[in-house]
């Protein structure tokens, strides 16, 4: 059974091999894209790279160094 049409979001981001980075808060979904070194938020206005808010280097360094990212 299909509930609706699958609609992809614009961009090249994805959760990849880190499903443990998935977190939900209200109507927002957060996850890490380790390949691109980004922390992302999916909400009603679309996909946003929130690591670009002054912490881009921090997350790029950490996501390249570690294998597991726990979303909470």
Image (cartoon, grey):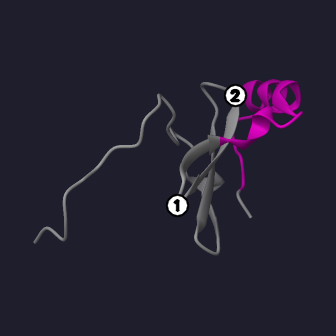
Whether 47 is drawn above or below 67: the answer is below
Q: Quadrant of residue 22?
A: bottom right
The residue to which callout 1 is attached is 44
| Horizontal and vertical percent position of residue 58 | 88, 30
Which quadrant, please, contains the C terminus?
A: bottom right
Residue at point 41% right, 42% down?
A: 9
Q: Quadrant of residue 25?
A: bottom right
Residue at point 42% right, 36% down?
A: 10
The residue to which callout 2 is attached is 37
Q: Which residues are magenta?
A: 49-70
| Horizontal and vertical percent position of residue 37 | 69, 28
Q: How many marks?
A: 2
Q: Are marks 2 and 1 in contact (CB under 8 Å)?
A: no
Residue 55 within the segment the image draws in magenta: yes
Whether 38 is drawn above or below 46: the answer is above
Q: CA distance from mark 2 to mark 1?
A: 23 Å
């Amino acid at each position: 059974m299909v509930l609706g049409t699958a609609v992809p979001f614009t961009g090249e981001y994805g959760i990849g091999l880190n499903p443990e980075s998935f977190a939900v808060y209200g109507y927002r979904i957060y996850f890490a894209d380790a390949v691109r070194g980004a922390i992302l938020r999916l909400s009603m206005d679309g996909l946003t790279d929130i690591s670009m808010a002054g912490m881009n280097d921090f997350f790029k360094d950490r996501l390249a160094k570690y294998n597991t990212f726990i979303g909470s």
